[in-house]
Image (cartoon, helix red, strand yellow):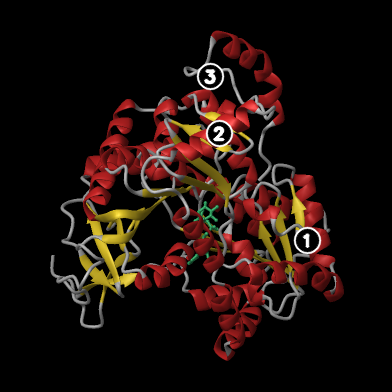
């Protein structure tokens, strides 16, 4: 494959020709693009993960393993912008089975509270295993002895275990970008034990929210027979640390955009183009059923119908980025959303004045920042979300402290941005009240809420997130855990600090029958009481 702007010959790598830091993610941090002369080239992907890891990967001569986005043979490894890229090949069947099937039609909905029913298909599972193995083997080939390997997200949950078998010398970290579900949902998964064993192959497993960490600890004991104590998780002779690492954004970049005169001028222009309404409400999501777009539109439509918001003075802009368009549920969602937008505009718009501007498009960072600056109310109301970076981007962009963020309790971001108008997105009346209150808030009230959120983000940006995770992984013992570590666990379990009662009904191994009986009797109240809220 001839591509214009990459170097086919790799520069010097770490020590023995392999890499001290290896990142694995479903996608490489580059997209196929075309240069000014119409030649194919690579362009760095937008997005927080790439921004966060780019400087670290450059500094540490790291390698990134991922799919390049097209089915068929993989391009040979190349360097882009100082990062060594190792593309993984996927066939059409892999894309259908591993990516669209097991990852996005089984795991994605199941981990998001099953807000759409997950589909299960045994052939998808085979592809998921095969592709995870391909990633693990690629990492085993390129990682230097004792290297740090950081595996990302739900597509690659089997990789840590597979890689541990191939290369026990590595320190392996795993970060899940989406929620980790409660026991009763996770146990629907046909591959449940296999996935738990896969994740427990890591030294450090990171989650967006403390509830995900708790769910994982519970399942580690129940499904994999791990010893879980206050001190940590002991599994197959190793320590596994499970911790919460809420991801963040590039705050400095967002502030730079917010101060850019061209972006500020564009924000003013957007307001003019919208007809200079009193209130601009904005929502920015991938067009995904987890994002709560339908409930949000319903609430907005009812507010207009009841006269609580004046259609002549209020405009909503709903940006819905195209995503996963091959999957039936996403096509159906698009039709429903577009019908609802038409209905609201049909009922409440006037000549030359619409109530909902619906943009099924991608935008660059500057245009998004201009939209954030133009918006009086930002509606971030997912039914379930690992974090939600849009909420953080909005707050970071509002340099003067104005703007009203309405935020779902079911977004991971709610654990950090508690000064927002927090709302249950399933409750349309609560959504209506939150939108109406936020639209009516004066500048003093907006600042009272916005300033602490902005201060929090300045301290917890994406660089702090990435270095926090990698520093912790760096401290993991290389290879198998030491006998000292084992002794610590035995002492903890024996000194009155009993292992947590973290069993559930779907336990399959690793327990005595008495423990299993105890587990079963505890199951119902544990399951009911541990449903996550973020
Ligand atoms: P996503 O579900 O993709 O991420 P989110 O966290 O909101 O959701 O990130 C979306 C990103 O895309 C934001 O940076 C946003 O600016 C950008 N974006 C949105 N609309 C856009 C548009 N029209 N054009 C261009 N860019 C647009 C998953 C999890 C989240 C978790 C992230 C990171 O589902 O819960 O926060 O990973 O861990």
Residue density around tag 1, few if under 14, some if 14–19, many if 20 or more, within 10 Å: some
- In which quarter of the view is residue 76 placed? bottom left
Please give the residue where the numbered disc 3 appears in the rendered image.
506
Q: Are marks 1 and 3 in contact (CB under 8 Å)?
A: no
Comparing labels 1 and 3, the label whose residue is closer to the camera: 3
Please give the residue where the numbered disc 1 appears in the rendered image.
419
Label 2 CB, ligand 1: below 8 Å? no
Residue at (60% x, 22% y) in the render: 503
Comparing labels 2 and 3, the label whose residue is closer to the camera: 2
Please give the residue where the numbered disc 2 appears in the rendered image.
489
329 left or right of 440 in image? left
Residue at (75% x, 65% y) in the render: 311
Residue at (65% x, 55% y) in the render: 413
Q: Which is more N-terminal, label 3 or label 2?
A: 2
- In which quarter of the view is residue 443 placed? bottom right
- Distance from disc 1 to disc 3, alpha carbons, whole Å, reads 38 Å
Q: How many marks?
A: 3
Residue at (18% x, 71% y) in the render: 3
Residue density around tag 2, few if under 14, some if 14–19, many if 20 or more, within 10 Å: many
Q: Position of residue 238 (x, y in %)?
A: 44, 37
134 left or right of 427 in image? left
**Residue 96 to residue 184: above or below:** below
Q: Which is more N-terminal, label 3 or label 1?
A: 1
Q: Are marks 2 and 3 in contact (CB under 8 Å)?
A: no
524 left or right of 342 in image? right
- Distance from disc 2 to disc 3, alpha carbons, whole Å, reads 25 Å
Residue density around tag 3, few if under 14, some if 14–19, many if 20 or more, within 10 Å: many
Q: Position of residue 307 (x, y in %)?
A: 83, 58
Helix, strand or loop under label 1: loop
Q: Position of residue 340 (x, y in %)?
A: 60, 50
Q: Is residue 351 visible?
A: no
Q: Are marks 2 and 1 in contact (CB under 8 Å)?
A: no
């Amino acid at each position: 494959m001839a591509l214009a702007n990459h170097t086919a010959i790799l520069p010097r790598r770490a020590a023995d020709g392999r890499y001290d830091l290896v990142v694995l993610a479903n996608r490489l941090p580059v997209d196929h693009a075309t240069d000014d002369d119409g030649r194919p080239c690579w362009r760095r992907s937008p997005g927080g993960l790439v921004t966060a890891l780019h400087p670290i990967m450059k500094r540490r001569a790291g390698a990134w393993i991922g799919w390049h986005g097209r089915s068929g043979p993989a391009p040979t490894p190349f360097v882009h912008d100082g990062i060594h890229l190792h593309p993984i090949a996927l066939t059409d069947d892999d894309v259908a089975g591993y990516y669209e099937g097991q990852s996005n039609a089984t795991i994605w909905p199941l981990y998001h509270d099953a807000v759409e029913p997950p589909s299960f298909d045994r052939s998808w599972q085979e592809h998921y295993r095969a592709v995870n193995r391909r990633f693990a083997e690629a990492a085993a080939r390129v990682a230097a002895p004792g290297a740090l390997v950081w595996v990302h997200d739900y597509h690659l949950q089997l990789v840590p275990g597979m890689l541990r078998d191939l290369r026990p010398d590595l320190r392996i970290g795993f970060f899940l970008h989406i929620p980790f579900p409660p026991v009763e949902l996770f146990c629907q998964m046909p591959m449940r034990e296999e996935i738990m064993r896969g994740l427990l192959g890591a030294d450090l497993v990171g989650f967006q929210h403390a509830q995900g960490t708790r769910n994982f600890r519970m399942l580690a004991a129940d499904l994999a027979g791990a010893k879980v104590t206050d001190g940590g998780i002991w599994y197959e002779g190793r320590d596994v640390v499970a911790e919460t690492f809420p991801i963040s954004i590039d705050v400095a970049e967002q502030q730079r955009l917010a101060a850019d005169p061209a972006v500020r001028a564009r924000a003013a222009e957007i307001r003019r183009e919208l007809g200079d309404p009193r209130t601009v409400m904005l929502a920015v999501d991938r067009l995904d059923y987890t994002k709560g777009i339908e409930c949000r539109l319903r609430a907005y439509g009812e507010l207009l119908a009841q006269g609580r918001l004046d259609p002549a003075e209020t405009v909503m802009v709903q940006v819905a980025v195209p995503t996963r368009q091959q999957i039936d549920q996403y096509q159906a969602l698009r039709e429903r959303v577009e019908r609802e937008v038409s209905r609201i505009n049909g009922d409440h718009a006037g000549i030359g004045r619409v109530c909902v501007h619906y943009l099924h498009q991608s935008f660059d960072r500057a245009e998004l920042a201009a939209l954030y600056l133009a918006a009086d109310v930002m509606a971030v109301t997912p039914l379930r979300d690992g974090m939600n970076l849009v909420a953080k981007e909005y707050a970071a962009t509002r340099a003067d402290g104005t703007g009203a963020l309405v935020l779902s309790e079911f977004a991971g971001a709610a654990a950090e941005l508690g000064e927002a108008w927090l709302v249950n997105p399933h409750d349309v009346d609560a959504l209506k009240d939150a939108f109406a209150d936020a639209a009516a808030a004066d500048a003093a009230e907006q600042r009272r809420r916005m300033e602490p959120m902005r201060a929090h983000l300045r301290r917890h940006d994406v660089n702090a997130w990435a270095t926090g995770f990698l520093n912790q992984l760096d401290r993991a013992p290389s290879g198998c855990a030491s006998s000292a570590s084992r002794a610590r666990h035995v002492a903890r379990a024996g000194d009155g600090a009993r292992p947590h009662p973290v069993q559930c009904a779907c336990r399959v191994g690793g327990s005595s029958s008495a423990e299993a009986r105890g587990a079963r009797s505890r199951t119902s109240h544990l399951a009911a009481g541990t449903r996550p809220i973020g």
